[in-house]
C-alpha cells in the first residue's frame, strides 16, 4: 500500500533524540531520487528527494532497491542518513507537545482508515455490479464524500499506475476507456482528508475471466483430508471453484444427492477403490479420475500400470484439455514421480497424451454418449488423468501440469452442465417432496414432513422450491437441496395452485377459501389480492417476460390470463373442465395444459388459438411442466402412478419415474441446464501499492 502523508503543522518542542528510535526506515533508490517512507507508531510518512544520478536510461524497476545495487550502497547510506534526519527534524518541527504528537498520529491513522474504506467500498461496488463499466467512465467517481469525520475522493483510471504517482504511466496500456474490454486492468486512487492529515492509497486491479465450477471432490474421509488432497483442494479453490467434499464410503443416496449439486466429480487417488465402487459410473455429470483401479471399471481401458517420469507426449494439442500445453514431449512435473498408463483403450476413448517413446495412453477422454470399454455409454464426460499411482505427489505438478488438471476439470464440467436439470414433485402419499434428474435417474427425497402438499413451484434463478400445504395452511420454501426451510405466508386455508416469477421477484398463489389469486414478494412480504371472484383455480403459470399470468378455473371451465398486476383479464380457452396442469413457453409462444375431464394434454398459442391435442389417454393427470430448451414436456399421472415425458409435440412418450402414487404437482429446475456450458465470472485480483 503506497502512502503519501502530510503532517499537520505544530510548534517544535520535542528533541530529535527522543523520537528517533521510534522510526523504521524504508528507502528505495529510484531513477528520480530517494523514496523514503518513515513509520512512526505504525503510521507512514513518505517523501521523495531528487538525487541526480547517471544511467537514467536504465529501468526504474532494475534500480528500485538499494541492496540490489552494491556499487552505490555507500552513496545510498549517506543519502538515507540525510533523509532520515531531514524527515525527523521536519516531524519534530511540525509538532509540539507529546499530546500534539499523539493527535497528529491519530489524525494520520484516521485518514488512512478513511482512504482504505473508500477503496474497499469502490471494490465492493465493482464486484457487485456486473455492468459497472457501462455505468461508469474514467476519472473522478466520488468527490469529498463524508466518512468517519473526514472525507474521501475516488478516481478510477483505465490502465495500471506502475510508478504509483496517481497517473497512468503506460499510455499504450490505458486507452482511457473502462468499457471497451471487461478484462482491462484499471487503477483506483483513494484520497482521504482528516483535519490537516492527508492519505492517498493506490491499487491496481487485474480482472480475470474464470469459470464457475462446482466440484465434488471424492476423498477417503471428508472430515480428515490427506496431505495430497489438501493440495488438490487448494488448487481448485485457487482457481475459483466451488468445492464440496464427500467420503468414498458414503451411501449411493448421498452420492446421488451430491451429484445433483455438482458439475464434475473428481476422484482422488487417495481413496480406497472398493469403498467407492461404481457409485459414480452412471452419474450424468462430468468425471475426472485419478484412481488407477477404475481404469477398467469406469470404461477407459482394460488395465493400467505405473512408471516414473516428469513428462508426457502430447499427441493431440487441439483438444480443450491440452490447449496451451507444449505439443510433443512436455514436462508436467517438477521432479520425477509416478504416472500411470491405460493399456488397451477401448470404446469411444480418445487418447490425448502417451508415454514418451511408447504408445501407451496416459491421458484419455470420453465424450458424453460415447461407448465405454466393457459396454454401455458414458452418462457424462469422462477424463482419465495421467497421474494417480500410489507414489504420486501433487505438489510436483508444475505450471503445465496444473493447467492440464484445470482444463480437464472445466472440460468435464462443461459437458455436465448441458445435461443438468431436475424435476421436482410432491409425493402426497408419503408426505414429502422428491426430485430426480430430467432423465429420471437419481431420484431422492428433498423435503420430508409435507403434510398435505397441494402445489409446487421452482425459482431456478433464486435456487428455491416453493410449496403450499393445506394442512399447515402455509406456503413454504427451501433451497433446492431441501436446506433452509422457512414458512413464508400463513393463513392460506385452501391453497390450490402456485406460480413463481423469479426475475420479477413475485410469488403467485390461488386460495379456494378466498376465491382469489394473491401475490407477494418472494420472501412473503407485501402480500396483496390480485384477482377476485374466482371459484377454484386448479393451476397457475407465469410468463414474466411476456408480462402475463395464466390460470385454469374449474368453475368457469376455462383458461384465463391477465397482466401481472391483475388487469386486463380475458378468457382464452373454453371447455377445460378440470385443468390439472398448466405451463407456458413464452419464447415459443405456446400454452400447455392437462385436461383431466378429456384425459389428454393439449397446447395452443398464447392467445388460446390453434389448439391441438398432444397426448391422449392420460387418465388422471395431476401436474404438468415444460422444458422448452430440452424440447420436452413432463406430467404426473395418478392412475399409472408414474411421471411421464414426451417431446413438445407429444411424440415419443415415455415412462420416466415409477412408483409415484399421488403427485401434488410437478415443477422443473432448469437454471443451470439451459446455459449450454459453465457460467463464466470475472475475478478481480487487487494489488495494493
Image (tube, rainbow, N blue to C red):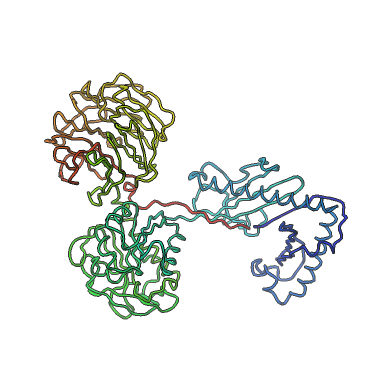
**In the figure, residue 465 lies in which quadrant?**
top left
Residue at image coords 41%, 32%: 524
Asked if residue 336 is positioned above or below residue 511 in the image, the reply reads below
User: Could you tell me residue 523's position as x and y percent?
Assistant: 42, 35
**In the figure, residue 569 lies in which quadrant?**
top left
From the viewer's side, name the closer residue of 216 and 156: 216
Residue, far top: 533
User: Could you tell me residue 198's position as x and y percent?
Assistant: 73, 49
User: Could you tell me residue 390's position as x and y percent?
Assistant: 35, 75
Badge count: 0
- For the N terminus, the quadrant is bottom right
Asked whether residue 320 is in view, the answer is no
Residue at image coords 51%, 43%: 134
Image-based side of 506 in relation to 293, left or right: right
User: Could you tell me residue 532's position as x and y percent?
Assistant: 33, 20
Asked if residue 501 is positioned above or below residue 212 in the image, the reply reads above
Asked whether residue 234 is in view, the answer is yes
Asked if residue 434 is positioned above or below residue 472 in the image, the reply reads below
Image-based side of 437 in relation to 18, left or right: left
- For the C terminus, the quadrant is bottom right
From the viewer's side, name the closer residue of 686 and 209: 686
Residue at image coords 42%, 67%: 402
Image-based side of 680 in relation to 67, left or right: left
From the viewer's side, name the closer residue of 532 and 346: 532
**In the figure, residue 272 lies in which quadrant?**
bottom left
Amino acid at each position: 500500500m503506497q502512502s503519501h502523508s502530510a503532517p499537520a503543522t505544530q510548534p517544535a518542542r520535542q528533541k530529535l533524540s527522543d523520537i528517533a528510535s521510534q522510526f523504521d526506515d524504508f528507502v528505495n533508490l529510484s531513477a528520480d531520487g530517494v523514496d523514503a517512507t518513515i513509520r512512526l507508531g505504525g503510521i507512514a510518512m513518505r517523501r521523495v528527494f531528487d538525487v541526480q544520478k547517471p544511467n537514467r536510461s536504465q529501468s526504474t524497476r532494475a534500480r528500485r532497491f538499494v541492496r540490489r545495487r552494491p556499487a552505490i550502497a555507500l552513496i545510498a547510506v549517506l543519502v538515507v542518513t540525510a533523509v532520515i534526519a531531514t524527515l525527523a527534524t521536519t516531524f519534530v518541527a511540525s509538532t509540539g507537545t507529546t499530546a500534539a504528537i499523539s493527535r497528529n498520529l491519530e489524525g494520520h491513522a484516521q485518514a488512512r482508515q478513511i482512504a482504505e474504506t473508500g477503496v474497499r467500498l469502490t471494490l465492493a461496488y465493482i464486484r457487485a455490479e456486473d455492468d459497472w463499466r457501462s455505468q461508469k467512465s474514467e476519472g473522478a467517481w466520488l468527490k469529498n464524500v463524508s466518512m468517519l469525520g473526514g472525507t474521501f475522493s475516488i478516481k478510477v483510471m483505465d490502465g495500471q499506475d506502475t510508478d504509483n504517482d496517481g497517473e497512468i504511466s503506460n499510455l499504450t496500456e490505458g486507452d482511457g476507456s473502462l468499457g471497451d474490454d471487461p478484462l482491462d486492468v484499471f487503477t483506483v486512487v483513494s484520497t482521504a482528508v482528516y483535519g490537516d492529515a492527508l492519505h492517498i492509497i493506490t491499487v491496481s486491479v487485474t480482472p480475470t475471466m474464470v469459470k464457475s465450477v462446482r466440484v465434488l471432490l471424492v476423498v477417503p474421509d471428508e472430515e480428515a483430508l490427506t496431505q495430497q488432497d489438501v493440495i488438490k483442494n487448494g488448487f481448485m479453490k485457487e482457481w475459483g471453484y466451488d468445492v464440496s467434499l464427500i467420503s468414498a464410503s458414503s451411501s449411493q443416496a448421498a452420492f446421488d444427492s451430491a451429484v445433483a449439486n455438482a458439475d464434475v466429480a473428481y476422484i482422488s487417488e487417495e481413496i480406497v477403490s472398493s469403498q467407492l465402487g461404481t457409485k459414480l459410473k452412471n452419474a450424468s455429470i462430468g468425471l475426472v479420475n485419478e484412481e488407477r483401479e477404475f481404469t477398467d471399471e469406469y470404461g477407459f481401458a482394460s488395465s493400467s500400470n505405473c512408471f516414473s517420469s516428469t513428462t508426457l507426449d502430447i499427441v493431440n494439442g487441439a483438444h480443450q484439455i491440452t490447449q496451451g500445453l507444449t505439443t510433443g514431449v512436455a514436462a508436467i512435473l517438477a521432479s520425477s514421480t509416478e504416472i500411470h498408463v491405460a493399456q488397451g483403450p477401448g470404446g469411444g476413448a480418445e487418447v490425448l497424451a502417451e508415454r514418451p517413446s511408447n504408445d501407451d495412453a496416459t491421458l484419455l477422454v470420453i465424450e458424453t454418449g460415447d461407448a465405454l470399454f466393457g459396454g454401455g455409454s458414458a452418462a457424462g464426460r469422462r477424463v482419465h488423468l495421467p497421474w494417480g499411482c500410489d507414489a504420486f505427489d501433487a505438489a510436483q505438478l508444475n505450471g503445465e501440469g496444473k493447467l492440464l488438471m484445470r482444463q480437464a476439470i472445466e472440460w468435464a464440467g462443461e459437458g455436465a452442465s448441458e445435461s443438468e436439470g431436475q424435476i421436482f414433485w410432491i409425493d402426497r402419499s408419503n408426505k414429502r417432496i422428491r426430485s430426480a434428474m430430467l432423465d429420471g435417474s437419481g431420484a431422492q427425497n428433498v423435503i420430508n414432513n409435507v403434510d398435505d402438499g397441494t402445489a409446487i413451484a421452482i425459482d431456478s434463478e433464486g435456487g428455491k422450491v416453493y410449496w403450499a400445504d393445506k394442512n399447515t395452511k402455509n406456503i413454504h420454501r427451501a433451497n433446492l437441496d431441501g436446506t433452509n426451510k422457512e414458512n413464508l405466508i400463513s393463513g392460506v386455508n385452501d391453497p390450490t395452485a402456485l406460480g413463481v416469477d423469479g426475475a420479477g421477484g413475485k410469488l403467485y398463489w390461488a386460495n379456494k377459501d378466498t376465491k382469489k389469486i394473491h401475490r407477494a414478494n418472494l420472501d412473503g412480504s407485501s402480500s396483496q389480492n390480485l384477482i377476485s371472484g374466482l371459484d377454484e383455480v386448479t393451476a397457475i403459470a407465469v410468463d414474466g417476460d411476456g408480462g402475463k399470468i395464466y390460470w385454469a378455473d374449474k368453475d368457469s371451465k376455462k383458461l384465463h390470463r391477465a397482466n401481472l398486476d391483475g388487469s386486463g383479464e380475458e378468457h382464452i380457452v373454453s371447455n377445460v373442465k378440470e385443468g390439472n396442469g398448466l405451463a407456458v413457453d413464452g419464447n415459443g409462444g405456446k400454452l400447455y395444459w392437462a385436461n383431466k375431464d378429456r384425459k389428454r394434454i393439449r397446447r395452443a398459442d398464447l392467445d388460446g388459438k390453434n389448439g391441438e391435442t398432444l397426448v391422449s389417454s392420460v387418465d388422471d393427470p395431476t401436474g404438468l411442466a415444460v422444458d422448452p430448451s430440452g424440447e420436452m414436456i413432463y406430467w404426473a399421472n395418478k392412475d399409472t402412478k408414474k411421471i411421464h415425458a414426451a417431446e413438445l409435440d407429444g411424440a415419443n412418450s415415455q415412462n420416466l419415474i415409477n412408483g409415484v402414487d399421488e403427485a401434488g404437482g410437478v415443477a422443473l429446475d432448469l437454471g443451470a441446464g439451459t446455459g449450454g456450458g459453465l457460467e463464466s465470472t470475472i475475478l478481480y485480483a487487487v494489488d495494493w501499492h
